[in-house]
Image: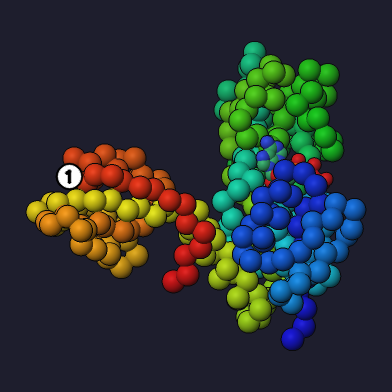
Amino acid sequence: MKTLKIAIQKSGRLNEKSVELLKNCGLSFENYKSSLISPVSNFPLEILFLRDDDIPEYVQDGIADLGIVGENVIEETEVDVAYLQRLGYGKCSLKLAIPVNSDIKTIADLNGKAIATSYPSILKRFLAKNNITADIRTISGSVEIAPGLGMSNAICDLVSTGGTLKSNGLQAFADVLKSEAILIGRKGEENNPLTQELIQRVQSVLRAKETKYVVLNAENKNLDTIKTLLPGIKSPTVVPLAEEGWSAVHTVIPEKDFWERISSLKNAGAQGIVVMPIEKIIL
Ligand code: ATP
Ligand code: ZN
């Protein structure tokens, strides 16, 4: 079978999490910072370490079969690739921001104004959709200093916490795109059995991250109430304890409403609750 190639960021915000994800998928490889290609010893896969901006085109053109890159970069390069899996990290938003003392109040006020950005093609489409004509000034970095230098009235830039905007006297006033890291593939790649195997491994790692393994003890008279509070993959496992009239309940709980569930379990009589991380969930 043909060896697959996956392109990930060589260094930067997505590198570490992408390497971690592939390692959690059970792939064994050296993370040499100096080399461009790393072979995987236990799966027919090679990892290409690239600048993130190059990844969408490499995948579209088939130089790599798969890639992990921010949605913002994919949308900006306007490539034709398959979105295989959203990965839940590298979250950020492309936002319009203005100086705190600006008289721009609504998107319509951007008409005739200058906007600095590193994302001209996404911004162009956004403005067209909103029937705005503005002067897009493309700059490759430090976009947030443009208004202060008199280069633009507003900016369109990536924001995760907003700290950089604030320290430059700017405030966000509209969302252009919400982004996260995405596993992409060359068109048709989703039909390749090796790719399908890899996607399944990625999904099992993502599912495990969203859930915790929980073991608790309860008196048998409380079991019915406790069971109604537990989702589990099918139903919880109930094992009798050495102490007469008591059982241990094993189950899996989603991370997002974890604390609410734990407190309702305690109220229903659960004791000695032990919570453990899960490595993988294979359905
Ligand atoms: P490269 O050297 O690969 O070109 P880069 O400097 O263009 O790297 P990074 O700053 O490492 O890129 O960001 C990579 C991706 O991380 C972004 O494209 C975006 O999807 C995501 N990201 C998450 N949070 C942020 C943020 N606060 N600012 C910028 N990018 C972010
Ligand atoms: Zn880049």
Amino acid carrying label 1: it is Gly
Residue 244 coordinates in the image, percent (x, y):
13, 57
Horizontally, residue 145 falls left or right of residue 257, namely: right
Residue 48 coordinates in the image, percent (x, y):
82, 62
- Please name the residue shown 65% across and 34% down the image: 159
Q: Secondary structure at mark 1?
A: loop
Q: Which image quadrant: the C terminus?
A: bottom left
- Please name the residue shown 26% across and 39% down the image: 263
Q: Quadrant of ligand 1?
A: top right
User: Front-most of 282 and 13?
Assistant: 282
Q: Which image quadrant: the N terminus?
A: bottom right
User: Front-most of 190 and 276?
Assistant: 276
- Please name the residue shown 62% across and 64% down the image: 25
User: Front-most of 168 and 108?
Assistant: 168
Residue 162 coordinates in the image, percent (x, y):
62, 27
Q: What crowding class fits label 1: few (fewer than 14 Cα within 10 Å), some (14-19), or many (20 or more)?
A: some
- Please name the residue shown 58% across and 28% down the image: 173
Label 1 CB sits under 8 Å from any ligand 1 atom: no
User: Front-most of 129 and 206?
Assistant: 206
Q: Residue furthest bottom?
A: 1
Residue 96 coordinates in the image, percent (x, y):
65, 32
**Location of residue 156 (image quadrant):** top right
**Location of residue 104 (image quadrant):** top right
Horizontally, residue 1 falls left or right of residue 103, namely: right
User: Compared to 202, does 164 lie above or below?
Assistant: above
Residue 215 seen in this snapshot: yes
Tag 1 residue: 269
Q: Residue furthest top?
A: 101
Residue 225 seen in this snapshot: no
Q: Residue furthest front?
A: 242
